[in-house]
Image: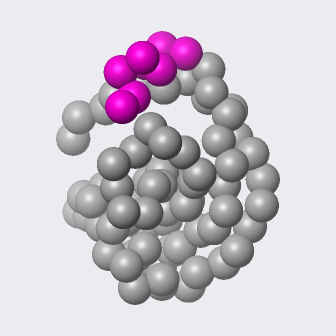
Amino acid sequence: KYEDSIGKQIELSVTGVCFDDKGQAAIIETNLSEKEVPHITLSCEENTKPVYSDILLKNKTNYKSVNFKVTGKVEVIHF
């Protein structure tokens, strides 16, 4: 889905965040993701893999509703 967007600037709406002491994830509105809850992993603890964001989102850990836009270049990063 996202192949045509690689290297291009896009704008995303951020609608929520989930976080704990191991990681942070921003919930986004996009058709570029195949995830059940499209998101961006913002950070994760040194020994925590980015996939931990899926757990945060599933459990709605410390969920906060937000409403703002971010702009950035689409890149694929393999962990």
Residue beneath the point at 56% across and 85% down: 62
Percent x, y of residue 3: 35, 21
Percent x, y of residue 48: 26, 64
Visible in this render: residue 46? no
Instruction: Say left or right for 65 vs 26.
Output: right
Instruction: Say left or right for 10 vs 7.
Output: right
- Highlighted range, magenta: 1-8
Quarter of the view holding residue 10: top right
Q: Quadrant of the N terminus?
A: top left
Residue beneath the point at 59% across and 51% down: 29
Q: Main secondary structure of the magenta part?
A: loop
For residue 71, above or below residue 40: above
> Can residue 19 be found in the magenta stretch?
no
Instruction: Say left or right for 8 vs 34.
Output: right
> Can residue 7 be found in the magenta stretch?
yes
Judging depth in this view, the residue of 48 and 56 nearest the camera is 56
Q: Residue furthest right?
A: 68
Residue beneath the point at 48% across and 14% down: 7
Visible in this render: residue 58? yes
